[in-house]
């Protein structure tokens, strides 16, 4: 009539306790009520086959991908390179099959993870080529800076990128699938240091993938975060102060993007370590001639600190002004932009304390011989936030306006650029509308100072003429005596 069903009740030990035999103990864990049902002729589900053969096959594939091709000759070893690329795709699929929602799969047990780390190190870690000779030549700066906005040159793109791209995908997938304990067991500090050194690559595609991988490792390796922060700080310091390594700026922007994300998560109040990173690492990065390559990321990091602790604004402004360029017009424009963004992030109290040094520098830039620098400095007055704080601060306009009045009058009289003169006239009209009496008083004081300076110059010139006449008379007497 059907499958025979037999009910078996586990015998009880004296005192109500179950017997401790192994079979009954295991059955009791499944059926605490002591009743077990056995179905005759029922299908019995067998345990899955041993994973050892699949794991060994995957490890063999990973080990076979440790061979690195040079890609110097497109025809040489083409079949083997295609085979390696196919195996990398299979490894990537196996790693991605391991998810957190399922039990740990075959792809990321300790033996497979060790093989993956060996394969990643063999394919990724390599000596970086030296920078091109033109980057050491000061005369090459103009061409290098002009090309910074363009797409990367073909010479900077790695021919081995089809393989490297798959390797970076495997690295990202392994980081996402592995648990932090497994990562700590296989990814050591030497691996992290070697990974950070790859930011010197000239290929922007590799730097972008590397940025994602390094940041993912920072998120999972909580015990290594302090070491990773120190490593990034040392790399940035080496770039800022070592002239030989400052010949190219590759990787600095990506490292700063990682730092910006980390700074965004700092707790308030900031630790001394974090303030030291701002003062001793970020501010010295303003001194390099490659500032244009990573200025956007640098400003973001600086502003994150100011949003968390506005009291650091004084040290930031002083650090930027100390590293102001003398002859690099492009850097001047960038730093004026940064000062304007710093002003936007400040409150009225902090702006009043820093308005004089900031505005004195901007006023000096307004009379620059470079039309770009002069126009950018004058356009600061188009910033509504800057104009509002300059006008509403107690005594702020009285302190900053004299320098701007002198720059405006000087531009209107003698600047060579017609565009700069037009912008200067517009700024003069604006300031006369905002503070007409103060502007007239500053203009009168400027005229009086100029008249006094002209009078002193006239007196000095007359004194020199008398000295020259006396010297000429003294030289004439010996000549008459000799005759």
Image (cartoon, helix red, strand yellow):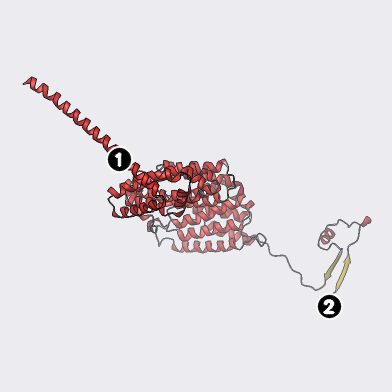
The quarter of the picture where the C terminus appears is top left
In the depicted structure, whether residue 404 falls above or below residue 174: above
Asked if residue 133 can be seen in this view, the reply is no
Q: Position of residue 17 (x, y in %)?
A: 90, 56
Say whether disc 1 or disc 2 marks the residue closer to the N-terminus. Answer: 2
Give me the residue at 28% from left, 48% from top: 413
Quadrant for the N terminus, please. bottom right
Task: Out of 252 and 379, give the one closest to the viewer.
Answer: 379
Q: Which residue is mark 1?
A: 450
Q: Can residue 178 be seen in this snapshot?
A: yes
Q: Residue 440 got which mark?
A: none
Q: How many marks?
A: 2
Depth order, front residue of 31/376: 376
Which residue ends up furthest to the bottom in the rendered image?
1
Residue at x 53%, y 58% (from the top left corner):
64
Classify residue 181 as left or right of residue 193.
right
Q: The residue tagged with tag 1: helix, strand or loop? A: helix
Which residue position holds label 2?
2
- In the rendered image, the residue lying farthest to the right is 14
Q: Position of residue 414 (x, y in %)?
A: 27, 48
Give the distance between the C-alpha atoms of the residues marked 1 and 2, in whole angstroms. Answer: 117 Å
- Helix, strand, or loop for circle 2? loop
Residue neighbourhood size for the residue with mark 2, other residues' Cα within 10 Å, grouped as few (<14), some (14–19), many (≥20): few
Mark nearest the camera among 1 and 2 is 1
Q: Residue at x 44, y 58 (%)?
A: 160
Return the residue found at the far front.
Answer: 437
Residue reaching furthest to the left = 483
Residue 412 horizontal/vertical position (percent): 30, 50
Residue at screen point 48% across, 58% down:
164
Residue 366 image offset from top left, x and y in percent: 35, 48
């Amino acid at each position: 009539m059907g499958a025979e069903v037999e009910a078996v009740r586990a015998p009880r030990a004296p005192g109500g306790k179950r017997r401790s035999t192994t079979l009954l103990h295991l059955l009791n864990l499944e059926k605490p009520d002591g009743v077990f049902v056995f179905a005759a002729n029922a299908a019995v589900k067998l345990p899955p086959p041993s994973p050892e053969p699949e794991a060994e096959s995957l490890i063999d594939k990973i080990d076979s991908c440790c061979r690195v091709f040079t890609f110097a000759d497109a025809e040489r070893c083409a079949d083997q390179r295609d085979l390696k690329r196919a195996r990398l795709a299979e490894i990537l699929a196996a790693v991605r099959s391991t998810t957190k929602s399922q039990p740990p799969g075959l792809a990321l047990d300790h033996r497979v993870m060790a093989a993956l780390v060996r394969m990643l190190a063999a394919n990724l870690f390599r000596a970086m080529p030296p920078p091109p000779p033109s980057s050491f030549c000061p005369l090459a700066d103009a061409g290098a800076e002009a090309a910074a906005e363009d797409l990367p040159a073909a010479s900077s793109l790695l021919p081995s990128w089809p393989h490297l791209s798959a390797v970076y995908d495997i690295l990202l997938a392994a980081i996402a699938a592995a648990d932090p304990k497994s990562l700590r067991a296989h990814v050591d500090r030497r691996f992290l240091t070697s990974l950070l050194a790859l930011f010197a690559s000239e290929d922007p595609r590799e730097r972008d993938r590397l940025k994602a991988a390094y940041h993912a490792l920072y998120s999972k390796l909580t015990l290594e975060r302090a070491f990773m922060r120190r490593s990034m700080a040392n790399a940035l310091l080496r770039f800022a102060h070592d002239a030989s390594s400052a010949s190219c700026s590759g990787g600095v922007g990506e490292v700063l993007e990682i730092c910006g994300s980390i700074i965004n998560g700092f707790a308030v109040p900031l630790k001394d370590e974090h303030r030291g990173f701002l003062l001793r690492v970020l501010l010295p990065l303003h001194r390099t001639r490659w500032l244009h390559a990573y200025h956007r990321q640098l400003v973001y990091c600086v502003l994150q600190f100011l949003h968390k602790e506005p009291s650091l604004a004084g040290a930031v402004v002083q650090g930027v002004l100390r590293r102001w360029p003398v002859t690099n017009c492009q850097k001047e424009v960038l730093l004026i932009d940064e000062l304007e963004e710093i002003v936007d992030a400040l409150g009225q109290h902090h702006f009043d304390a820093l308005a004089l040094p900031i505005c004195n520098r901007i006023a000096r830039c307004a009379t620059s011989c470079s039309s770009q620098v002069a126009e950018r400095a004058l356009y600061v007055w188009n910033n509504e936030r800057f104009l509002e704080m300059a006008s509403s601060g107690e005594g702020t306009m009285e302190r900053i306006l004299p320098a701007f009045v002198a720059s405006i009058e000087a531009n209107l009289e003698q600047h060579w650029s017609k565009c700069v003169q037009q912008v200067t006239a517009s700024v003069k009209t604006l300031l006369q509308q905002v503070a007409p009496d103060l502007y007239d008083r500053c203009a009168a004081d400027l005229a009086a100072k100029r008249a006094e300076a002209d009078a002193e110059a006239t007196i000095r010139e007359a004194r020199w003429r008398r000295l020259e006449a006396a010297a000429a008379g003294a030289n004439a007497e010996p000549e008459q005596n000799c005759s």
